[in-house]
């Protein structure tokens, strides 16, 4: 198998505008909702500004009352009531737009995850061979989480801050253009500080996300290989490696949050300085009656001063989150934009009825027999050929990486119903051959024919439906035992599942489980033994009833006694099918029609068991124990 490579480290988004546009394209159907959000944000921000503006007449009115002068009590009550109503309306608007934004963000993320998962389902096996599972999982966890935070909070916060800044600045000019000069000077200083701190903070957050993905990938590997770690007493080394990765994450996180966290104290102190300067100058103007400044106006203006600094600080804080989210979104979109598995095939697999004269007609339902459906582009006619299971490899060369071949001129022919065995050392190319037969990888040089048809002309989905594979590494899904067996044929009846389990000799142990066929399996069948898990995999292949069967070390986890018990069932399973067997246990391939001995990607010996024993070659040495498979 090709070596795995880590995904590219998280970087600052290469094209921010394009990424933002791509995110908004997933918000289709929410134009009205988004308009309500913008309106709600505007009302909330306007309410905060208008509420502060009403402080001026209220305070000036109270000042007259305290001085013993005439004051309009009715106007005071109306103004106070208006302020309460405005703040209440602002609170309702905030609640409304936050709820709507939550729906928009969750739905948008659902659509992105759907597209991401759908694309991953269409990617070739080679893509997953070159990317670690932990890095791919981080797309669904870390990257989508940062994107969720941006969609649900940052967007609305930025809109609110922009409206507040414009509204407050306008009111400040109307109240006193002279005091606003102080605001402008302080604004320039704030922008410079945000630029310096934000630059370093952004790099820190990006490094943090990269380190987090690496640490998560290591944790996943450790959990999957926990038994191996304990068997070899590798706990200390695992701890040391994790501590190293955790230290890197801690350092990156510390650096990121150091710059992010110092921004707030700096901004607060600048706002206090700004507030003090405004209060002093405003107080002098009030005492001297300069510029029409009153106590009420000064109080309102000072509130505006606080309001003006707050959204700037909020925007600066959201900037890091937005950049990190956009970088994560770009990684997600890079996967979504990956080229799907190419499939130029046009020959399909269909259920068929075949009469005594060999005439083939397409059946409406599954009949037990299959045919290849050949549509002809020239005249639009359709012809059918029976699926027999003849497989031919003609001078096949293949390598997972350029200039590094794994198979060198492999040629073989398996007739329908024959059992072909592959024997050889690890890395000789046995599994690679089966990967090519089901088109997990395409052949760059040479041809593979299935019933005389170049497999490149057969649709991959139909090609794979005509085959079943039992792998050495069994994978079971969360669900019942019956559901896991039925995975080989989703429309299989209960009776077909029972028959397949009996054929694989799995029925006995299944019926002795607590809930029999309805026993729930979780954590990849952790409540079963390795041998039992493999028996279920064999039953899954049996229920599919394919013309071609591939057994890749299918009985490697089954003891010799159990293997002897299921030998008859396996023979029944293989009867009438073309079977490819990969085995290190040579006793399992003695009855093969032909045994292919591979070395360095070449077939160095071929023949049945007796012929190869008589040859006194490598197979003979392997079988007699003079040479061991590595």
Image: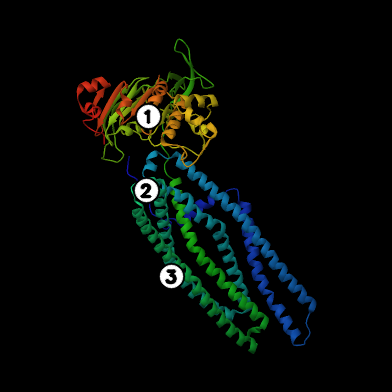
- Categorize mark 2 by other alpha carbons within 10 Å: few (<14), some (14-19), many (20+): few
Which residue is tagged 2? 230
Spatial CA span between label 2 and label 1: 30 Å
Task: List the single residue furthest toward the right.
Answer: 74
Task: List the single residue furthest toward the bottom.
Answer: 288
- What element does badge 3 sit on? helix
Which residue is tagged 1? 551
The answer to which of 508 and 428 lies nearer the viewer is: 508
Q: Which residue is at a point 63% across and 84% down the rendered structure image? A: 291
**How far from the left and from the top, in percent, is residue 394?**
29, 26
- Categorize mark 1 by other alpha carbons within 10 Å: few (<14), some (14-19), many (20+): many
Can residue 215 be seen here? yes
* Labelled pair 2, 1 in contact (Cβ < 8 Å): no
Q: Which mark is residue 44?
A: none
- What element does badge 2 sit on? helix
Task: List the single residue furthest toward the left.
Answer: 616
Q: Earlier in the sequence, mark 2 or mark 1?
A: 2
Colour basis:
rainbow
Q: In this view, does 415 lie to the left or right of 538?
A: left
Spatial CA span between label 3 and label 1: 62 Å
**How far from the left and from the top, in percent, is residue 37?**
62, 57
The answer to which of 17 and 427 lies nearer the viewer is: 427
The answer to which of 370 and 232 lies nearer the viewer is: 232
Which residue is tagged 3? 196
Identify whether 323 is placed above or below 517.
Answer: below
**How far from the left and from the top, in percent, is residue 186?**
51, 77
Judge depth for marks 3 and 1 and give the one in front: 1
Q: In this view, does 20 lie to the left or right of 441?
A: right
Identify whether 352 is placed above or below 105.
Answer: above
Q: In which quarter of the image is the N terminus?
A: top left
* Labelled pair 3, 1 in contact (Cβ < 8 Å): no
Q: Which of marks 3 and 1 is nearer the N terminus?
A: 3
């Amino acid at each position: 198998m090709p070596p795995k490579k880590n995904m590219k480290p998280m970087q600052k988004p290469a094209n921010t505008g394009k990424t933002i546009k791509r995110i908004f394209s997933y918000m289709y159907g929410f134009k009205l909702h988004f308009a309500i959000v913008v309106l709600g944000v505007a009302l909330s921000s306007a309410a905060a500004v208008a509420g502060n503006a009403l402080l001026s007449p209220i305070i000036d009115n109270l000042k007259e009352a305290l001085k013993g002068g005439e004051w309009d009590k009715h106007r005071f009550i109306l103004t106070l009531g208006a302020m309460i109503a405005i703040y209440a309306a602002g609170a309702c608007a905030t609640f409304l737009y936050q709820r709507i934004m939550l729906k928009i963000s969750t739905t948008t993320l659902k659509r992105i995850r759907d597209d991401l998962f759908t694309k991953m389902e269409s990617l070739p096996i080679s893509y997953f061979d070159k990317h670690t599972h932990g890095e791919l999982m981080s797309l669904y966890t870390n990257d989508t989480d940062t994107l969720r935070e941006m969609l649900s909070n940052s967007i609305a916060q930025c809109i609110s801050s922009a409206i507040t800044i414009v509204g407050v600045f306008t009111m400040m000019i109307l109240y006193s253009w002279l005091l606003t000069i102080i605001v402008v000077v302080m604004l320039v200083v704030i922008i410079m500080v945000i630029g310096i701190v934000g630059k370093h903070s952004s790099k820190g957050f990006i490094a943090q996300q990269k380190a987090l993905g690496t640490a998560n990938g290591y944790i996943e590997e450790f959990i999957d290989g926990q038994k191996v770690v304990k068997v070899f007493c590798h706990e200390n080394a695992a701890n040391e490696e994790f501590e190293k990765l955790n230290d890197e994450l801690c350092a990156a996180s510390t650096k990121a949050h150091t710059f992010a966290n110092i921004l707030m104290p700096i901004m607060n102190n600048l706002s206090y300085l700004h507030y003090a300067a405004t209060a002093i100058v405003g107080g002098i103007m009030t005492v001297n009656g300069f510029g029409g400044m009153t106590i009420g106006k000064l109080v309102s203006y000072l509130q505006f001063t606080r309001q003006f600094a707050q959204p700037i600080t909020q925007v600066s804080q959201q900037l890091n989150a937005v950049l990190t989210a956009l970088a994560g979104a770009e990684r997600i979109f890079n996967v979504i934009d990956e080229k799907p598995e190419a499939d130029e095939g046009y020959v399909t697999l269909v259920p068929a009825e075949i009469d005594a004269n060999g005439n083939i007609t397409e059946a409406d339902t599954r009949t037990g027999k299959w045919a290849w459906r050949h549509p002809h582009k020239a005249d639009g006619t359709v012809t059918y050929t029976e699926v027999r299971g003849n497989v031919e490899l003609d001078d096949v060369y293949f390598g997972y990486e350029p200039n590094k071949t794994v198979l060198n001129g492999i040629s073989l022919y398996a007739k329908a119903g024959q059992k072909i065995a592959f024997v050889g050392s690890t890395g000789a190319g046995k599994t690679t051959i089966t990967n090519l037969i089901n088109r997990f990888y395409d052949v760059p040089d040479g041809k593979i024919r299935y019933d005389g048809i170049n497999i490149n002309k057969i649709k991959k989905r139909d090609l794979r439906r005509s085959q079943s594979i039992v792998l050495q590494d069994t994978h079971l899904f969360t669900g019942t035992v019956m559901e896991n067996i039925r995975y080989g044929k989703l429309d299989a009846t209960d009776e077909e599942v029972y028959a397949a389990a009996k054929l694989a000799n799995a029925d006995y142990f299944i019926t002795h489980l607590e809930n029999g066929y309805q026993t729930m399996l979780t954590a990849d069948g952790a409540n079963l033994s390795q041998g039992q898990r493999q028996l279920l995999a064999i039953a899954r292949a049996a229920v599919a009833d394919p013309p071609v069967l591939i057994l890749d070390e299918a009985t490697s986890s089954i003891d010799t006694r159990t293997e002897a018990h299921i030998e008859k069932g396996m023979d029944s399973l293989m009867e009438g099918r073309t079977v490819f067997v990969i085995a290190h246990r040579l006793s399992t391939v003695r009855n093969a029609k032909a045994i292919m001995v591979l070395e360095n990607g070449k077939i160095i010996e071929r023949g049945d068991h007796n012929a190869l024993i008589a040859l006194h070659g490598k197979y003979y040495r392997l079988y007699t124990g003079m040479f061991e498979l590595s």
